[in-house]
Image (cartoon, helix red, strand yellow):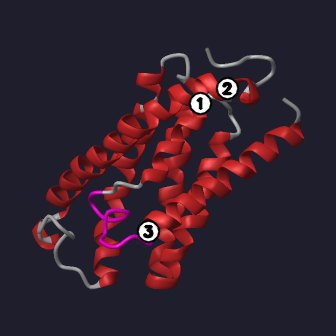
């Protein structure tokens, strides 16, 4: 794949991922953020099974989408821009490297988000003036180990539901329909 095609793919992936994430964040309720995140846009992490351009594309798309939190939370929102994007980047790298084994490869976004996002969620909750995790009622002052462990569990479950429940079927459809368009150096996902 030449450089122009790589950049174009990364740009399109970033735009689609950002737009899908912002759409989810605008939905009523709080399912797009917080301790349980059913961001349907995370199903797009399967694109890293097909092209390495998905790695920067997904990370940039996450950063762009999470910038909306800066307007809402001020500088504290930069935590999600920075560390949410890092989680997406690491998950996408894992997915690309293990692409020959899709079920294992898709653990990347689940594990990365489950381990990184809960580390800064209490700070975001405090900035929003929340004393309890939305929907689930866990008290943010329960202590860092309890809050982090709870976050690992809930973020991991939300990610797994979206990545495996929506993303894996999406990957099967993409494999049949467009995988040839996403080949890298003559290597296409099989």
Please give the residue where the numbered disc 2 appears in the rendered image: 179
Badge 2 marks a residue whose secondary structure is helix
Q: Could you say whether the residue bearing mark 3 is in a helix, strand or loop?
A: helix
| Residue with the mark numbered 1 | 174
* Lower sequence index among marks 2 and 3: 3
* Depicted 170 relative to depicted 40: above or below: above
The residue located at (16%, 74%) in the rendering is 132
Q: Is mark 1 on a helix, strand or loop?
A: helix
Residue 34 counted in the magenta span = yes
Compared across the picture, whether 72 is left or right of 119 comes to right
**Looking at the figure, which quarter contains the C terminus?**
top right
Spatial distance from mark 1 to mark 3, Cα to Cα? 25 Å
In percent of width and height, residue 86 lies at 53, 52
The residues bearing labels 2 and 3 have C-alpha atoms spaced at a distance of: 29 Å
Residue 33 lies in quadrant:
bottom left
- Tell whether 45 sits left or right of 34: right
**Nearer to us: label 1 or label 3:** 1
Nearest the viewer among 168 and 153 is: 168
Percent coordinates x, y for residue 113 in the rendering: 40, 48
């Amino acid at each position: 794949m030449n450089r122009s095609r790589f950049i174009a793919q990364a740009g399109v992936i970033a735009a689609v991922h950002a737009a899908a994430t912002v759409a989810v964040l605008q939905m009523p309720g709080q399912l797009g953020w917080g301790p349980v995140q059913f961001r349907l846009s995370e199903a797009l992490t399967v694109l890293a099974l097909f092209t390495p351009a998905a790695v920067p594309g997904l990370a940039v798309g996450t950063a762009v989408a999470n910038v909306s939190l800066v307007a809402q939370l001020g500088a504290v929102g930069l935590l999600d821009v920075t560390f949410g994007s890092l989680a997406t980047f690491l998950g996408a790298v894992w997915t690309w490297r293990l692409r020959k084994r899709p079920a294992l490869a898709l653990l990347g976004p689940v594990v990365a988000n489950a381990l990184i996002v809960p580390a800064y969620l209490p700070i975001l909750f405090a900035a929003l003036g929340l004393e309890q995790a939305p929907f689930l009622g866990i008290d943010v002052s329960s202590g860092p180990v309890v809050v982090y462990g709870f976050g690992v569990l809930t973020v991991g479950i939300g990610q797994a539901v979206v990545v495996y429940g929506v993303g894996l079927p999406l990957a099967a459809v993409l494999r049949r329909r467009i995988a040839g368009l996403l080949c890298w150096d003559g290597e296409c996902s099989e």
